[in-house]
Amino acid sequence: MKLDVLINKYYEKLNSNDLYILNYIKNNPETSDVNITLLSKMCNSSTASILRMTKKLGFSGYSEFKYFLKSLTASKESQDLKTRLEILASDVEHTMKIFKNNNQLSETCDLLYNAKNIYAYGTGYGQKLMLQEFSRCMLNCGKNIIIIPAFTEFRIAVRNMKESDMVIIASLSGNARDIAELIHILNLKNIPILSITNFNDNTLSKLTPYNLYYQSSNINTEDSLNNSSYVTLNLLLNFIYEGYMDFIESK
């Protein structure tokens, strides 16, 4: 399990100081080799604060947390030796596991079934392409998904959306800075929002009531672009489609 995943899981328990310590650890991998006293000096926090933070994340203490960090470092070094094909195969496997463990398919199908209008917005070009293919497939179920082409159109569409509608937002990074205000408006209007993001600690999944995840490891950290195809996003959307087909056939 990644550190980002743990942060996302226990986010409600963490305070600003906990998040500061964790952010420091994420940005300084060498901290996996230091003791709690040295770490407290490095991040200018007390040892007691660090210990409390580790327990909030489900660890028995700092020693277990440190072992977890060292295993992450070892895993990353191992991943660096993998070929692109191996990374993609691993992402597909993890996406399938994440989907099976998420347990939100039934709820997602209910939302799709009951929505009068379904809007879909991709934060990037690749996400928009995958949503277009998803929209094409969903026509087989009698569901017409309205693809919102750009932010300006998203802002205009939000004005006319009703509580009986539904919004799907697909993103890679989960950075919701540009659309946070629109999401806030949608939440105030009680319009269901399903976020589909890469499996990490991200803002978009925290702002939206319904979340599904895919795994995409081959990302250029400098520009947050996907160095490979959107196979896993397409896979997840196909899971939703096939699950919805089963859902309506059981009605």
Image (cartoon, grey):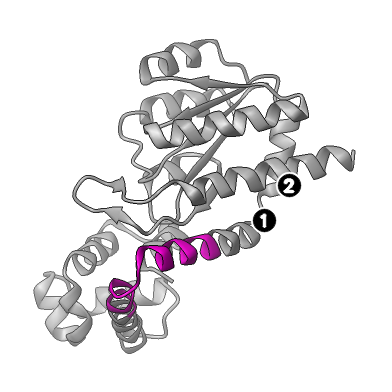
- Report the side of 153 relative to 39 (left or right): right
Q: Is residue 130 visible?
A: yes
Say which mark, if any, is on residue 181. none
Real-space Cα distance between discs 2 and 1? 7 Å
Please tell me whether residue 82 is drawn above or below residue 172 in the rendered image. Answer: below
Q: Where is residue 27 in the image (x, y as percent from the top left)?
A: 18, 64
Please tell me whether residue 27 is drawn above or below residue 82 in the rendered image. Answer: above
Q: Can residue 168 be seen in this view?
A: no
Image quadrant in which the N terminus is located: bottom left
Within the magenta stretch, is there residue 87?
A: yes
Task: Please identify the dominant SS of the magenta region.
Answer: helix
Disc 2 + disc 1, Cβ < 8 Å: yes
Say which mark, if any, is on residue 103. 1
Along the viewing direction, whichever of 143 and 17 lies nearer the viewer: 143
- Residue that mark 2 sits on: 106
Highlighted range, magenta: 75-94
Please tell me whether residue 36 is drawn above or below residue 212 in the rendered image. Answer: below
Along the viewing direction, whichever of 194 and 189 lies nearer the viewer: 194
